Amino acid sequence: MENAKFAIDGDKITNTSRWVATATAEHLIEIDLGQGQSINGFATWIGYNGIYENAVKEFYFQIYSDGEWQTIESEKSNVDAKYISAFPEVVARRVRYYVLFILVIR
C-alpha cells in the first residue's frame, strides 16, 4: 500500500500522490483528522495521470460518532470511476472509506 496520507492531499493527477490498497478483497482506510472537522462531501476515483478506469461499485463512507461508526454515504451499484457526493454537514474527527467491491470495466 502506498502512503495513506496521499488519500487526502487533494492531488488528483500525479502518480507520485495516490493511495493504493493492495487488498483484492474488502479493505478500508481510516483517517484521524486530529480534531472535529466539518464535512459535507466526499469524492473518490480510480486511475492515474488523469485517466480514470474501473469503479468502486460498493462502499461505505462513515464517521465515528457517539462510540460507533455511522454511515453517511453508501453505494451498492456505482459504475462511475469518479464518484462525487455532497451531503448535509456533519462534524467528525475520524472518517473511514470502506470498500466492499471494485468493478473492473476494462
Image (cartoon, rainbow, N blue to C red):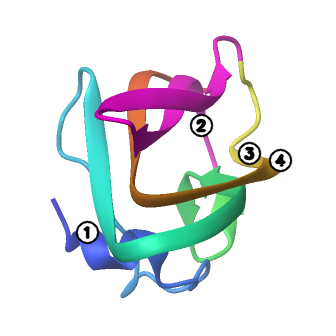
Q: Nearer the viewer, mark 3 or mark 4?
A: 4
Which residue position holds label 4?
A: 88
Which secondary structure type mostly characterizes the magenta part of the structure?
Answer: strand
Residue 100 visible, this angle: yes
Is 56 on the left or on the right of 36, as rendered?
right
Q: What amino acid does circle 1 point to? A: Ala
Q: What amino acid does circle 3 point to? A: Tyr
* CA distance for labels 2 and 1: 20 Å
Which residue position holds label 3?
A: 83
Q: Which residues are magenta?
A: 53-77
Is 80 on the left or on the right of 33, as rendered?
right
Which residue position holds label 2?
A: 54
Judged from the image, the secondary structure of the residue bearing numbered disc 2 is loop
* CA distance for labels 3 and 4: 17 Å
Mark 1 closeness class: few <14, some 14–19, many ≥20 residues within 10 Å: some
N-term mark: 2 or 3: 2
The disc placed on residue 4 is: 1
Horizontal and vertical percent for residue 67?
28, 34
Judged from the image, the secondary structure of the residue bearing numbered disc 3 is strand
* CA distance for labels 1 and 4: 26 Å
